[in-house]
Image (spheres, rainbow, N blue to C red):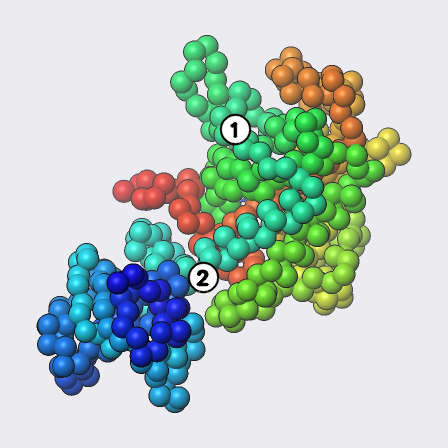
Amino acid sequence: MERTLNSELTDKIGEPVRTAGWVSIRRDHGKLIFLDVRDRSGEVQCVVTPKAEDALAVAKTLRPQWVVEIEGEVKERPENMKGAGVCGGVELVARRIAVLSQAEELPFDMAAELNLDTHLDYLPLTLRTKRSRDIFTMQAAILDAYRRSLIAQGFTEFAAPALVGGDAEGGAAAFKVEYFNDAVAFLATSPQLYKQIMVGPFERAFTVAKIFRAEKSATTRHLSEATCIDFEMGFVENEHAVMRALERSIRDVVEEVSRTHADMFERFGTTPPLTPEHFPVLTLQEALKALGKKEAPDMEPEDERGICEWAKKERGSDFIFITRFPTKKRAFYTYEDPAEAPYSRGFDLLFRGLEINSGAQRIHDQAMLVERMRDRGLDPQKFRYYLQAFKYGMPPHGGCSTGLERFTARMLEIPNVKEATAFPRDMNRIDVRLSD
Ligand code: ATP
Ligand code: MG
C-alpha cells in the first residue's frame, strides 16, 4: 500500500491507508490509546483499540518522537470533536503499527516554552516544534515569494562567491581565511562587488548569499553568518528606482504569505504587516525631527523603533524608508550627487522597528569610484578586478540587500533574530556553546 499523507486522509474516509510520521503525544484512556502523529503535511489523531491487539501492544511502548508506520482505516470524527488544522476532521483507527525508529526520553516537554540557549543547544530536536516549523515554513515562503517577485521584475539569479580576496566594504569586520599561498582571503561580508559586476551581463541580477560578519558584540539583531537577498539593477535615475523595485518585492512577499499563512500570524499573536500603496519615505533629518531629536549622522536602534511607531500611527505602514544619510556614513561605492552633498543616495528600509534592508544608487563612473576609494584610504590597485566592470561600460545603477533572518523575525514579531535562523552562529556559538 502506498503511503498517504495526513492531509490527504480527509479524502479517504472509510478506506484502508498506510501513514508514517513522528509520535507527538500518546494519551492512554482506559483500554484505548490515542496518538498524535506528525508528518510533513500536518498532525492527525490515531486511535488504537483492543480489537487490534498487536497494534495496542506496540502503542503501549510508544513515546514522543518515535517514528512509526501505521496501517488502519480513516474515520470521520464526530462534529463536536473536529479540531482545527488540516487533519482535524478525521482520525485514523490503527490496525497495525510498526516502529521505524525509537527515540530516547526527551530532555524536556516539547510543549514547554524554552529559554533561547536551551532551544539552541537542542536544535536537532527543537526545530521539530510547531513554533520552529512555523518560523522556517514562513522563511521558506518569504524566500520563494521574494525570488518570484524579482524574477517577474526581470532579474536573473546568480550564485555569489563566499570566499573573497578582500573585504568588499572595506569596513565591516571580515573573517580571515588562511589557506591560499601568499594571499589572505576573507569570507564575504556582502556579495556587493559581484552583483555590480553582474549588471554588465544581465542589467538586473540578484543573489541569495551568505554573508559573514565578525561582529564582536552579541545583540538580538546580529549574526556572524547571515543570509541576504541582494539585487542590483542598471539604468536607474536615482535611488528611488531601486526603492520602487524593493517595495514591489516586499509587497509581493507580504501578499503571498498573508494569503497562504494567515493562521501563522495568529499563532504568533501578530497580524500581516501593513503595506500602504506607497511606503512612507523620510530623509534622515526629517525622521529625527519627527522624533523631536537633534540632527545626527545616523539613527540609533531606539530611533529605528521610534520612527516605525510614527510610520504606523501617521501613515498606516509597518515599513518606512529613510534616505539621505551622510555619504561618509555609507559604503565607498555609494553615489553622491554634487548638488546633494554631503548627503548620499543611500537608503534604509525599516520594518517594525528594525533595519531589514540597505540600498543605494552606486557610483558608475570609474574615475569617480577610484577617487572615492583613495578618499577612503582604499588601494584601487586591490580592486582592479572589480574595476574592469566600470572600465568596460557600466550604466547608472543601484541595488539593495535584505537580511532574510531579520525580515522573518519582524514578520512574526520574534524578538531575537537567532530564533529566525535555523542554525545561528554568533561569537559564542557554532551549534554548541563555544565556551563549553
Ligand atoms: P546594522 O547597522 O543593523 O548592523 P548594517 O547596516 O551593517 O546593519 P548592511 O551592511 O546594510 O547591514 O546589510 C544589509 C542587510 O543585511 C541589513 O539591513 C540586515 O538586514 C542584514 N544584515 C547585515 N548584517 C547582519 C548581521 N550581522 N546579522 C543579521 N543580519 C544582518
Ligand atoms: Mg545597513
> Looking at the picture, which amino acid does disc 2 mark?
Asp
Report helix, strand or loop for mark 1: loop
Q: On the image, which quarter does residue 39 sit in?
A: bottom left
Residue drawn at x 89%, y 34% as measured from the top left:
339
Indicate if the residue with disc 1 has its beta carbon within 8 Å of ligand 1: no
Residue drawn at x 29%, y 61% as measured from the top left:
2
Q: Position of residue 154 (x, y in %)?
A: 69, 41
Q: Is residue 98 above or below residue 403?
A: below
Query: Is mark 2 in CB contact (under 8 Å) with mark 1?
Result: no
Q: Position of residue 340 (x, y in %)?
A: 85, 36
Q: Position of residue 277 (x, y in %)?
A: 76, 61
Ligand 1 lies in quarter: top right
* Circle 1 residues within 10 Å: few <14, some 14–19, many ≥20: some
Of 107 and 13, nearer the camera is: 13
Residue drawn at x 14%, y 84% as measured from the top left:
31
**What's the mark number on residue 286?**
none
Of 71 and 334, nearer the camera is: 71
The residue lying furthest to the top in this view is 182
Looking at marks 2 and 1 on the same chain, the residue that comes earlier in the sequence is marked by 2
Of 417 and 227, nearer the camera is: 227
Q: Is residue 147 above or below residue 291?
A: above
Disc 2 designates what residue? 134
Residue 113 falls left or right of residue 28: right
Residue 336, can we see it? Answer: yes
In which quadrant is the N terminus drawn? bottom left
Q: Is residue 379 above or below residue 100?
A: above
Disc 1 designates what residue? 161
Q: Disc 2 versus disc 1: distance between alpha carbons?
A: 30 Å
Report helix, strand or loop for mark 2: helix
Of 16 and 91, nearer the camera is: 16
* Circle 2 residues within 10 Å: few <14, some 14–19, many ≥20: many
